[in-house]
Amino acid sequence: MPAGFASICCMDIIMKKQADKINLIQKYKQLTAGKDKKQLILMWSTVLVCTLTIIFVCSCIIYTVNLNKTPNTLHTRFDEANQKMTNQKFNSYINSLINKKPAGNQQGTKTAEPEKGNVKETDKTTQKDNASVNKTIYKGVSTTQAAITFDDGYNRKYVEKVLDILKENNIKSTFFIIGKVLDDYPEVWKRAVNEGHQICNHTQSHQILTNMSDEAVQAEISGWETSARRVLGDDYLTRMKKEFPYLRLPGGGGAKSSRILKIAQKNGYKVIGWNVETVSSVINPLKNKKSVSEISDKIEQHVVNNCSGGSIILLHFNQYDMGNIEAIVKGLKNRGFQMKTISQLIK
């Protein structure tokens, strides 16, 4: 192809492109000049909307991809934090039950009955109140006597086992039995009374009294008396209120409360605590670490070694306390203690 002809073709192409540019510029000037102003606004609006739409869609895609990579991260962190807080609260509650020196213990080992609720001592006791209210009794004065007391009475098999052992060893004891449990197997409690044991008030349904109104506390005490009258008779209840009018507060709740003590005193009762027990001292610290038989061995050692003159020992009808109950009785006798009822111990 001749060089001149090629040059002419190139020039022609360049001229056409230049003309197109001029046409575009002229058209833009026409638009900006107001001839097609509406079209210009529509065009730029469309461009803006499309741009924002693209940005939004891209952002959603990126977020979805990142979320799918770690779908449970936030939930997992929240669950872990929540579980950690729950565990801390639970451990704090358990430690408070184990380490707290409850109302039933003025001397000797720390103690508490196993409770579903927490004991709250909210009552304020003034010096004037203390002067007019009988205090809780935790120990007798004898140097050669002690009292084994039994609470609740839930397990009939263990109750009958204890009665057999006490009979074999010629020991009389004091039982603080829940009113509802008296109704469960009345013949067992009649046997206990006939064999010379004392059955005393442990409230009708074993509630923490400091969490209750005066009327509710009164109902718990009176409700027990109704059950005792129905199971053991009017004569027994009359004799009990005269000769051994004892009340043990569930969990020790209220043993230092002037309000609770006043209600008990108004009903003719003396409140009995304890100074040797097994729940907080042995069972709670070991129940997830040792076998039942190992815990029973520790209970035997604990009770026999920590008993002193005038001690009031608290036991329950559970597998731990009952495991070595016969050995406990014999161990105390071998140390020279005479086992007595509460009325004999504190007279």
Image (cartoon, rainbow, N blue to C red):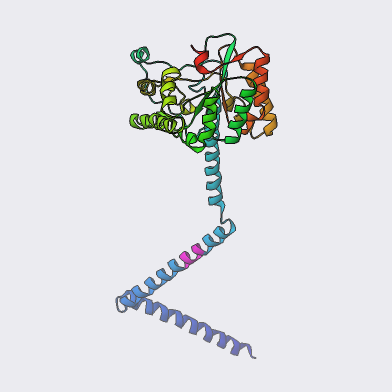
- In depth, the one of 248 and 342 nearer the eye is 342
The picture places residue 272, in percent across and down from the top left corner, at 47, 20
Image quadrant where one finds the N terminus: bottom right
Q: Is residue 280 above or below residue 185?
A: above
Quadrant in which residue 314 is drawn: top right
Q: In the image shown, does 290 or 37 lie closer to the viewer? A: 290
Q: Is residue 22 above or below residue 220?
A: below
Q: Which residues are magenta?
A: 54-60
Q: State the residue in front, 175 or 117.
A: 175
> How many numbered markers are drawn?
0
The residue located at (45%, 82%) in the rendering is 20
Residue 172, given in percent of the width and then of the height, sits at 57, 20
Quadrant for residue 315, please give it: top right
Query: Is residue 270 a member of the stretch shown in magenta?
Result: no
Q: Report the residue at 38% width, 30% height from top.
A: 222
Question: Within the magenta stretch, is there residue 55?
Answer: yes
Left of 120 or right of it: where is 146? right
What percent of the width, then of the height, locates residue 194? 53, 25
- Left or right, 35 with respect to 203, comes to left
- Compare residues 170 and 298 and report the one nearer the observer: 170
Residue 10 x %, y %: 56, 84
Q: Main secondary structure of the magenta part?
A: helix
**Residue 280 sits in quarter:** top right
Residue 152 visible, this orientation: no
Can I make out residue 270 in this image? yes
Residue at 49%, 82% in the rendered image: 17
Q: Does residue 233 sit above or below 52 in this rendering?
A: above
